Image: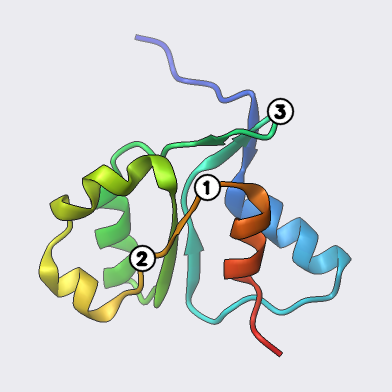
Amino acid sequence: MGAYISGGIGCAAYIAILSAIYKKNLKPGLAVLGNISIGGAIERSLNFADKVTLLSENGAKTVLVPMENLNELTSLPQSILGKTDVPFYGNSQTLLQKSILSE
């Protein structure tokens, strides 16, 4: 079984690059799941519940998740939802807006 190679960039790397270019601070405790394809489409995150749980247990306060994972929200333990915000994004503009620290 071969590894899945995405034809895009990780959304976390995308946000890191843009925040550096525009000199914008990211929210503290931010984690980002998903990829952006070469064409700009947002790709769902595999193993959604496991990743959000792991990130939350290691201090993430906000985990941004692709809209494609919305139907999996019920698979998250309530204890995770109680301590970690899990907003969804459907495009790169929304991703950037939800990542940047409000000024």
Q: Is residue 56 left or right of residue 101?
A: left
Q: Position of residue 11 (x, y in %)?
A: 60, 48
Q: Which mark is residue 86?
A: 2
Q: Position of residue 38 (x, y in %)?
A: 71, 28
Q: Earlier in the sequence, mark 2 or mark 3?
A: 3
Please state, as top left, top right, bottom left or bottom right, where the N terminus lies in the image. Answer: top left
Disc 2 marks a residue whose amino acid type is Val
The CA span between labels 2 and 1 is: 13 Å
Disc 1 marks a residue whose amino acid type is Gly
Kindly identify the residue that appears in the image at 77 percent across and 76 percent down: 24
Q: Is residue 91 left or right of residue 17?
A: left
Kindly identify the residue that appears in the image at 48 percent across and 77 percent down: 29
The CA span between labels 2 and 3 is: 25 Å
The CA span between labels 3 and 1 is: 15 Å
Q: Is residue 82 left or right of residue 20?
A: left
Q: Position of residue 80 (x, y in %)?
A: 20, 70
Q: Position of residue 49 (x, y in %)?
A: 24, 50
Q: Is residue 34 above or below residue 83?
A: above
Q: Which residue is mark 3?
A: 38
Nearer to us of marks 3 and 1 is 1
Considering depth in this image, is 67 or 51 the residue closer to the camera? 67
Q: Is label 2 in a helix, a strand or a loop?
A: loop
How did the renderer colour the structure? rainbow
Q: Earlier in the sequence, mark 3 or mark 1?
A: 3
Q: Which mark is residue 90?
A: 1
Please state, as top left, top right, bottom left or bottom right, where the C terminus lies in the image. Answer: bottom right
Kindly identify the residue that appears in the image at 77 percent across and 57 percent down: 17
Nearer to us of marks 2 and 1 is 1
Q: Quadrant of residue 81?
A: bottom left
